[in-house]
Image (spheres, helix red, strand yellow):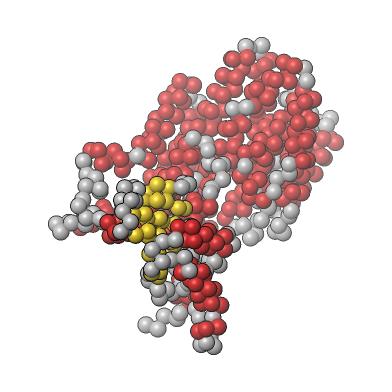
Amino acid sequence: MKRLDLQGVRGIAILAVLGFHLFPKLFPNGYLGVDQFFVLSGFLMCMLLTKSEKTEQSTWSLIKNFYIRRFRRILPLYYLIIFLSLIFLYLIFPDTAIVTNENSAKKALLFLSNRLKTDEENYFEMLSIAVDIFTHTWSLSVEIQFYLLAPFIFLLPSRIASMIYLSIGSFIYFYYLPPTGMIAFILCETSMQENQYKLVEDLEKNCAETKPSTSLKPNTIISVAFTILVILINFNQLPLPQNFVRPITTFLTTGIILFSNGENNKILSNKFITYIGDISYSLYLIHWPIYAYWKLTNNGNLVILFYSMMISIILAMIIYNYFETWYISLSNRNIAILTGVLLMGNVIILHRETINKHISQEHLTNFTSLDGITPNMTLDDAKRINYAWNTHDTQNLITPACNYATTKPLGWCNITGLDQNNEKKYKIIIIGNSWAANHAHIFYQECGYKARIMLIGAKYGCEPLYPSLKYGRCQNEIIDFQKHVEDFKPDYAFHITRHISYGEPFLKDGDFKNDPIYKIMLNNTKILTKNIKNKFYILNAIPRMSSTTQCSIPNTE
């Protein structure tokens, strides 16, 4: 039988998370709801392990039963929501959002969503105008990863009669490695610390399941007081320091669980709050993809945002009543089959394009022209190729003939297969941001026969002549451009870039020579040309107007 107070804690936690995701300015501390979920997970782990241990099962049976009970609860709904999210991704999301979210879905299926994104991944996400609809699965990844360790953490102290080691370890970890910023919000270790903290508390109490009692009035007062404090913190409109409120919330939630006895906390046992707790898992999984679609297509429209929230709640209620409660009642065998079918469905839908290619024997690369355009193309062919260009924009940056110094598709790479010993040919370098990578294959096709060595340098989000305003690291990238040109000493250099800062408007006084961007670009051009033997070609020399400036021009039509 469910403890109503625990469902109430879930209800408060999911409302806080919902407020933080949908209305971050109103509820800047709502992220603490996820911390509460982790504390609850620690308690449930201990309950399951203690129940199994009391039955005097073998170690193998204890661990097996623990995993069966947790996975049967988590996996079917988790894989169903990913499957439905992918369907709607392909149906209603822009083509440019597909590849980013496909990669994210693959990590989510393997419970690896808590891996920090690299700068390159963040940059490509920005370029693809994508919103990651699986971002929120990071917390489930943390939980599953901790489940892999929990039984062994639990069993180890009983084997060596030294639970104090775990307590001391958690204490040291808690106080000497405090969570900070977004890194702590995502990294697995920080959240595992919270689980260990709660697990130790429960172990000290032997995870005793106490029945409601009228003689525990002091416990009731403490439980209610802690609940009120948690609500005041989670829903406070002033952002509170994370290093302070996160351990406090962990402590308060632990206290609520230990001092509350089922129904003695009237706030947590309220029917509305407990029902929200019942649907909290469905609501957590559902709300983010819906919010992501709103953010991508209706950013700023609060009316539609409100409708999005209501749709999330209604869908969560439907899924809880007609799917969650149904599959929980199934046998382990049937749940395993259901989970396998849902997982296979996700794998198939993620590889649908590869499957279609094998079925139709149509390959976009089987064309004689560079871009796949042929004289006899139909409208369907054009739509198919446009779709491929949009969805595979990142992959298209990879040049097959390039030998990359680091990871593909950006950084530095040497074109292979050239006649390097022919002194009559030239050393050519191409520099820029992602556009340099995007056009590298064209340069190879057009200039390869003239080159004995061809070097491509592409820096994500950074222009070679001016440190892009959005990225502080770009000054270092400019120095790297200059160093490579100095070391390489090319005969010819080509500059091609997607304009970010170059397109900023000139000074209003009209004195071109005093323009700060122009002066820095001119100086960096001089530094580069010192080490270029023949010519430095600045392609697309007149920058296109920046999107920000363009949007500020009044519509005169």
Q: Tell me the residue at 21%/50% (across/down).
A: 367
10 or 144, nearer to the observer: 144
Q: Provide residue 499's location: percent of width, then percent of height.
A: 45, 68
Residue 437: image quadrant is bottom left
Which of these two is toward me, 415 or 441?
A: 415
Left or right: residue 8 versus residue 222 is: left
In the image, residue 333 lies at what x, y percent?
Answer: 45, 20
| Residue closer to the observer: 211 or 107 | 107
Q: Where is residue 461? Give x, y as percent.
A: 49, 60
Give how far across and how far down residue 402 sits, in percent: 37, 49
Of 541 and 157, which appears nearest the observer? 541
- Quadrant for the N terminus in the image: top right
Q: Residue at x 53, y 73 (%)?
A: 523
* Residue 209 versus residue 217 in the image, above or below: above
Classify the position of the C terminus by image quarter. bottom left
Q: Is residue 117 above or below residue 302?
A: above
* Residue 86: quarter of image: top left
